[in-house]
């Protein structure tokens, strides 16, 4: 790709980008939220047309007017936003519109067989090929999207933050697949904000900043992480999880979870979170961590047990009741669970506080925007113009908007599901700082993260969840990463 420029109405997403990819390499694309990574790969995959610039494929200049055209060339893409269709089965998602479907009819037998084969390659033989995708958890959907990208036997496979929804075990599976592809001579473009992943899987790196290439084709081995961070951000960022945990500011628990369970989903769990305390749930995807959060929030109805906030029992299965008692949830799948994609940024931020701006039937949009703007600035949301549609924000910035919502709301119990998913190093440090600040103000935080390092760094106490059960509870200062990983694996395979 040479001199790629891409303008959107009101935004210059790419401003002259060069990228050269070789067969048989894993080429990593790095850059902060909004740097232009997704836009660049969408130009390559035919989803966007460049305003200017040229693309050469095997030495010949090409135009890639559609995603089908890209597939025909041999370029297959896994997008950052999960783009699977909930109402279709796993096999249909993978093979509809595929060479296997002629005249709109899917050759079922073949498709099912190939689907099972792909799922096996990805380490997930247990996902039923005929299951409706809507019934799979976020990680399952990601696996389906991966299987679809692999199904085309492409020569170039683009992966935009594939690991964001994966747990450590699944990342290993993914890496095995990526290495196998590379060894077969396939080129892989890999995007991730997790620098340790880049070190492990990448061969060469291109760094984008503000829509420009700041460094290209760096050899991973010759480039220290420190240098990568300063290339991306323009300065050095130290991520120390915002210092040590604040710890409980009172011994009176704020959140009490007492024998809470959903039959067949997770076994009874009991724990407390005090004001100022951060409690982390560690475990594999599918262990039941998100379900526990969602049940506390009332998005799922418990079949046993209860949740109390400041001693007051919450009504089962009522989000309204939870919110009115000061409980907020930033969910893991922001697109389907949290954001109103056709609304402006400010409306998304003020969503749970809406009533405050709508007195006597009149909506005070100005106050609403001002409140949103304040939080957007605090989180360095980019672009800071809160009137823009949330859809036009980069993935990491959408995540920040989601957090801003609960900051405006000022909730006392904050449930965070994968709070730094898809967030760059700089913003990550800001979010950690924010959690610390909320703790100081007496907020009780319950968080889920697939990054064990993050759980240990941020939480005072850690509950290890495996297969719907809490298998271990302890102070994070007494645990290390290997120990937690062992507990997680042991619990999962018991
Ligand atoms: N459809 C669109 N309309 C207007 N602006 C857009 C659109 N899509 C992207 N942008 C803007 O282009 C810039 C680059 O966005 P892009 O999604 O490529 O970033 P990214 O590097 O992938 O970030 P992240 O790490 O957060 O995913 C951002 O400023 C974004 O707001
Ligand atoms: Mg992106």
Image (tube, rainbow, N blue to C red):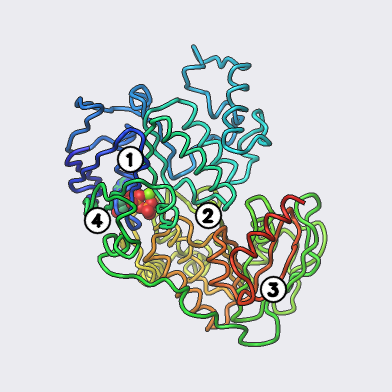
Q: Which numbered disc, 1 or 2, marks the residue closer to the eye?
A: 1
Q: The residue tagged with tag 4: helix, strand or loop?
A: loop
Q: Residues within 10 Å of mark 4 (few under 14, many from 20)?
A: some
Q: Residue at x 26, y 35 (%)?
A: 49
Counting from the top left corner in percent of width and height, residue 429 is at 41, 70
Indicate which disc, 1 or 2, sits on the residue closer to the N terminus. Answer: 1
Q: CA distance from mark 4 to mark 2?
A: 27 Å
Indicate which disc, 1 or 3, sits on the residue closer to the N terminus. Answer: 1
Is the C-beta separation of discs 1 and 2 under 8 Å?
A: no
Q: CA distance from mark 1 to mark 2?
A: 25 Å
The residue beneath circle 2 is 338
From what the image shows, is residue 124 above or below residue 414?
A: above
Q: The residue tagged with tag 3: helix, strand or loop?
A: strand
Is the C-beta separation of discs 4 and 2 under 8 Å?
A: no
The residue beneath circle 4 is 210
The residue beneath circle 1 is 41
Indicate which disc, 4 or 1, sits on the residue closer to the N terminus. Answer: 1
The residue beneath circle 3 is 474
Q: Residue at x 65, y 65 (%)?
A: 483
Indicate which disc, 2 or 3, sits on the residue closer to the N terminus. Answer: 2
Q: CA distance from mark 4 to mark 1?
A: 15 Å
Q: CA distance from mark 4 to mark 3?
A: 42 Å
Q: CA distance from mark 2 to mark 3?
A: 31 Å
Counting from the top left corner in percent of width and height, residue 283 is at 65, 58
């Amino acid at each position: 790709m040479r001199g790629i420029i891409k303008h959107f109405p009101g935004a210059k997403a790419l401003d002259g980008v060069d990228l050269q990819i070789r067969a048989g390499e894993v080429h990593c694309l790095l850059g902060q939220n909004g740097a232009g990574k997704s836009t660049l790969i969408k130009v390559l995959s035919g989803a966007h047309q460049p305003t200017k610039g040229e693309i050469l494929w095997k030495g010949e200049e090409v135009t890639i007017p559609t995603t089908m055209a890209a597939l025909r060339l041999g370029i297959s893409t896994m997008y950052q936003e999960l783009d699977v269709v909930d109402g279709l089965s796993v096999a249909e998602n993978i093979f509809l519109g595929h060479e296997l479907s002629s005249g709109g009819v899917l050759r079922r037998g073949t498709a099912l067989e190939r689907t099972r084969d792909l799922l096996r390659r990805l380490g997930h033989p247990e996902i039923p090929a005929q299951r409706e995708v809507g019934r799979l958890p976020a990680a399952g959907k990601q696996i389906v999207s991966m299987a679809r990208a692999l199904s085309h036997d492409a020569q170039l496979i683009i992966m935009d933050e594939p690991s964001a929804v994966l747990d450590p075990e699944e990342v290993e599976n993914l890496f095995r697949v990526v290495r196998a592809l590379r060894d077969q001579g396939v080129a892989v473009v890999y995007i991730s904000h997790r620098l340790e992943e880049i070190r492990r899987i990448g061969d060469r790196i291109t760094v984008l900043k503000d829509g420009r290439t700041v460094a290209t084709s760096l050899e991973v081995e010759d480039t220290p992480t420190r240098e990568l961070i300063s290339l991306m951000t323009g300065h050095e960022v130290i991520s120390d999880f915002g210092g040590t945990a604040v710890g409980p500011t009172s011994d009176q628990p704020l959140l009490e979870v007492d024998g809470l369970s959903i039959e067949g989903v997770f076994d009874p769990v009991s724990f407390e979170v005090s004001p100022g305390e951060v409690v982390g749930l560690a475990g594999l995807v599918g262990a039941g961590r998100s379900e526990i959060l969602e049940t506390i929030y009332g998005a799922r109805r418990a079949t046993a047990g209860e949740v109390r906030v400041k001693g007051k029992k919450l009504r089962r299965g009522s989000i309204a009741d939870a919110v009115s008692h000061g409980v907020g949830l930033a969910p893991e799948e922001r697109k389907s669970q949290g954001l109103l994609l056709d609304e402006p940024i400010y409306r998304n931020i003020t969503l749970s506080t809406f009533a405050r701006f709508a007195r006597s039937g009149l909506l005070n949009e100005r106050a609403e925007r001002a409140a949103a703007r304040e939080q957007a600035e605090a989180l360095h949301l980019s672009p800071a113009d809160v009137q823009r549609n949330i859809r036009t924000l980069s993935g990491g910035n959408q995540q920040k908007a989601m957090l801003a919502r609960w900051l405006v709301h000022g909730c006392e119990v904050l449930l965070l599901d994968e709070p730094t998913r898809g967030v760059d190093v700089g913003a990550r440090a800001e979010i950690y700082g924010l959690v610390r600040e909320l703790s100081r103000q007496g907020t009780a935080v319950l968080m889920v993260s697939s990054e064990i390092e993050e759980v240990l760094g941020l939480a005072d106490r850690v509950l290890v969840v495996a297969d719907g059960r809490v298998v271990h509870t302890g102070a994070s200062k007494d645990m290390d990463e290997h120990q937690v990983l062992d507990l997680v694996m042991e619990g999962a395979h018991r």
